[in-house]
Amino acid sequence: MDMVKVTFTLDDRTVSRLRHAAARLNKPQSQVVRDAINDHADRVGRLTEAERVRMLAAFDAMTGRRHTRAAADVDRELAALRSARRQGGRRRHGG
């Protein structure tokens, strides 16, 4: 793997945490940074735990609702839609 030297400015707390992590892992600081960037890049685009919980709650709320229409009414509406599709849907007349 080719290496490119880069320069970053980090706050004291971040540098301290980087040094501590590198010492605990017995790895060079640059490897800790590479690993951290790769881990972060893998998570980009994924839902956070809070987002996941919020979306699951919304899903549960939607699926938990009781049906307000009788099954026979739904069946009639579906039959009408299927019939309209077979007949070409909404066509313009006389235009």
Image (tube, rainbow, N blue to C red):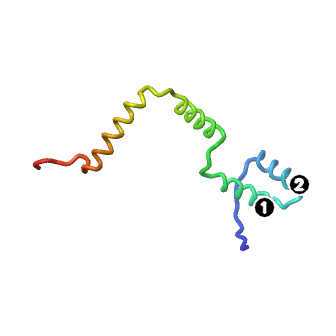
Label 1: which secondary element? helix
Quadrant of the rendered image containing residue 63 = top right
Q: Is residue 91 above or below residue 57?
A: below
- How many angstroms separate mark 2 from mark 1 (CA)? 12 Å
Q: Which residue is mark 1?
A: 30
Numbered tag placed on residue 23 in the rendering: 2
At label 2, the amino acid type is Ala
Q: Nearer the viewer, residue 39 or 90?
A: 90
Q: Which quarter of the image is occupied by the N terminus?
A: bottom right
Q: Residue at x 55, y 35 (%)?
A: 59
- Residue 30 coordinates in the image, percent (x, y): 78, 61
Q: Residue at x 62, y 52 (%)?
A: 44
Q: Is residue 70 above or below residue 6?
A: above
Q: How many marks?
A: 2
Q: Residue at x 70, y 58 (%)?
A: 38
Quadrant of the rendered image containing residue 34 = bottom right
- Residue 64 coordinates in the image, percent (x, y): 55, 29
- Residue 8 coordinates in the image, percent (x, y): 70, 57
| Residue farthest toward the bottom in the current orientation of the protein | 2
Query: Would you call the spot at circle 2 few (<14 residues within 10 Å), some (14-19), or many (20 or more)?
Result: few
Q: Is residue 73 left or right of residue 33?
A: left
